[in-house]
Amino acid sequence: MLNLFAPAKKNTAIPDDTQGRVDFTSAIVNYSLVFNEFMALCVSIKVKEISGSATDLAAACQETSATAEETSATTQQISAGMQQVKAGESENYNRLRNLNDLLKTRVPY
């Protein structure tokens, strides 16, 4: 009878116990190699995910930076406008005081 799954006959005679140990060690080594390749694949996938997240985070940081610059520019514009209003307020106060003084000198009560 032909058995396809039987190990090939070898020229040297190896005791069954030794051959069993060799087969077991070979199976453990093969399992270790496959497991290491699997872990390397998992790490590679995680690195790609982290890389994508880092790219998204960098884009969000750039958007935040641009928004901060726009906010700073707007704040400076508001500050300049407030200074102009304050200067106009002082000027108008001085004008009103001068008009009041002028009225006091012109119109006797």
Image (cartoon, rainbow, N blue to C red):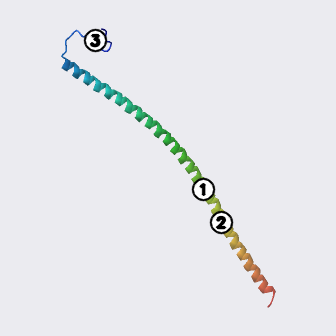
The residues tagged by marks 2 and 3 sit, at their Cα atoms, a distance apart of: 95 Å
Say which residue label 3 marks: 8
Residue type pointed to by label 1: Thr
Say which residue label 1 marks: 71
Q: Residue at (58%, 50%) from the top-left corner?
A: 66
Where in the figure is residue 27, as x and y percent of width and height? 29, 24
Work out whether mark 3 precedes mark 1 in sequence or the reverse, and give the earlier one: 3
The one nearer the camera, 33 or 57, is 33
Say which residue label 2 marks: 82
Q: Secondary structure at mark 2?
A: helix
Relative vertical location of residue 15 with respect to residue 71 in this rendering, above or below? above
Where in the figure is residue 59, as x and y percent of width and height? 54, 44
Q: Residue at (73%, 79%) from the top-left corner?
A: 97
Look at the image and tell me in which quarter the C terminus lies. Answer: bottom right
The residues tagged by marks 3 and 1 sit, at their Cα atoms, a distance apart of: 79 Å
Look at the image and tell me in which quarter the N terminus lies. Answer: top left
Residue type pointed to by label 3: Ala
Looking at the image, residue 97 sits to the left or right of residue 37; the answer is right
Q: Secondary structure at mark 1?
A: helix
Relative vertical location of residue 7 with respect to residue 79 in this rendering, above or below? above
The one nearer the camera, 61 or 94, is 61
Looking at the image, residue 24 sits to the left or right of residue 102; the answer is left
